[in-house]
Amino acid sequence: MSTIGIRPNFTQHLPLPPDEAQASIVGTVRSESEDFEVKSFPGFVCVRIPTEERHFWSPRLNLSLEPEDDGSTRIEGIYGPNANVWSLFLYGYLITASFAIFGGSLGFAQWQLGRTAWGLWIFWTSLILIVALYLLARIGRKLGAPQTARLHQLYELAIGRTVELQNG
């Protein structure tokens, strides 16, 4: 796990029914580390970093457990930031991209009409903000990487086998 992608994820099959697989994962996580926060709902488990260690960039592990026809369980796991952080970047990109499109269109129209193309200032400022958001996300990903690795090790301990991450 040398590089951790934006939203690392995995898919895995366990030879247990979903209820047993979920009980096993939740029980092991709670017994191995009482500090980790575990939320469990039917077919869903969320594991978070301990509250005292949590910061703005702290990841969480969301597990979706679905039954297979043969009685086993298909687990889909995804590591990602808190929903507030994810929303902040999603809307940040959406708003700045909208301004970039607007500014670029306005600036191009002004330039074609032989007028002062002040709309291009909006375009270039928006592009700079998009790059700044990207760099900030990269920094945050690096700051959260050790905690992502801890969550992954805890999950592997809970299921008793190694799991290869896919970078999403």
Image (cartoon, grey):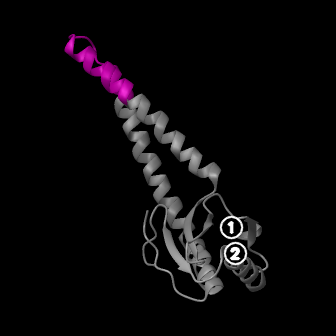
Q: Which residue shows up at 49% across the image and 62% down it?
A: 7
SS type, badge 2: helix
Q: Which mark is residue 45?
A: 1
Q: Is residue 109 magenta?
A: yes
Q: Which residues are magenta?
A: 101-122
Left or right of 133 on screen, residue 122:
left
Callout 1 amino acid: Val
Q: Which residue is mark 2?
A: 22
Q: Which residue shows up at 60% across the image and 89% down it?
A: 160
Location of the C terminus by quadrant is bottom left
Which of pointers 1 and 2 lies earlier in the amino acid sequence?
2
User: Residue 141: where, in percent of width, then height?
Assistant: 51, 63
User: Residue 70: where, in percent of width, then height?
Assistant: 55, 77
Task: Check if mark 1's residue and mark 2's residue have beta carbons within 8 Å.
Answer: yes
Image height check: is 28 above or below 95?
below
User: Residue 30: where, in percent of width, then height?
Assistant: 77, 79
Left or right of 155 on screen, residue 7:
left
